[in-house]
Image (cartoon, rainbow, N blue to C red):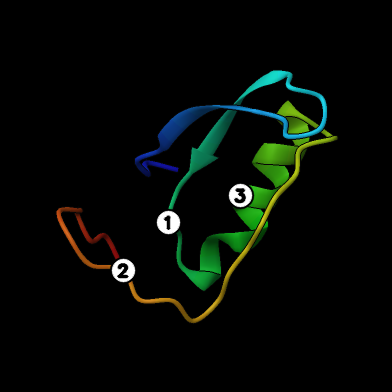
Amino acid sequence: MGRGVTYWKGAGAYTNTDTYILLTVINKYEEDQIRRIVEAQDPHAFVILSEGMRVSGNFERRL
């Protein structure tokens, strides 16, 4: 999709299993595309979508 992704190494609070947490910012028109990509890579992925947030800082805006 041409978007940047940030990741953190995390661990499950209950299982203490190592995992990676991926974060990207998309616009509302890209939501279906990102869902298809994630589903194809990991059908059991835990995904949080948050609408109406403001993003600021050092990023490249491509709309």
Residue sitting at 45 percent across and 48 percent down? 24
Q: Which residue is mark 3?
A: 34
Q: What x and y, as percent, mark residue 7?
A: 44, 32
**In-image side of 14 versus 48 (left or right):** right
Q: Which residue is mark 2?
A: 55
Camera-nearest residue between 47 and 27: 47
**In-image side of 24 versus 32 (left or right):** left
Q: CA distance from mark 2 to mark 1?
A: 8 Å
Q: CA distance from mark 3 to mark 1?
A: 10 Å
Residue sitting at 63 percent across and 63 percent down? 49
Camera-nearest residue between 62 and 48: 48
Q: Earlier in the sequence, mark 2 or mark 1?
A: 1
Query: Closer to the observer: label 3 or label 1?
Result: 1
- Which mark, residue 25? 1
Name the quadrant containing residue 20.
top right
Q: Are marks 2 and 1 in contact (CB under 8 Å)?
A: yes
Q: What x and y, as percent, mark residue 47?
A: 70, 50
Q: Name the amino acid, label 2.
A: Val
Residue sitting at 45 percent across and 59 percent down? 26
- Classify mark 3: helix, strand or loop: helix
Dot 2, how many residues are within 10 Å of its Cα: few (below 14), some (14-19), or many (20+)? few
Camera-nearest residue between 1 and 5: 5
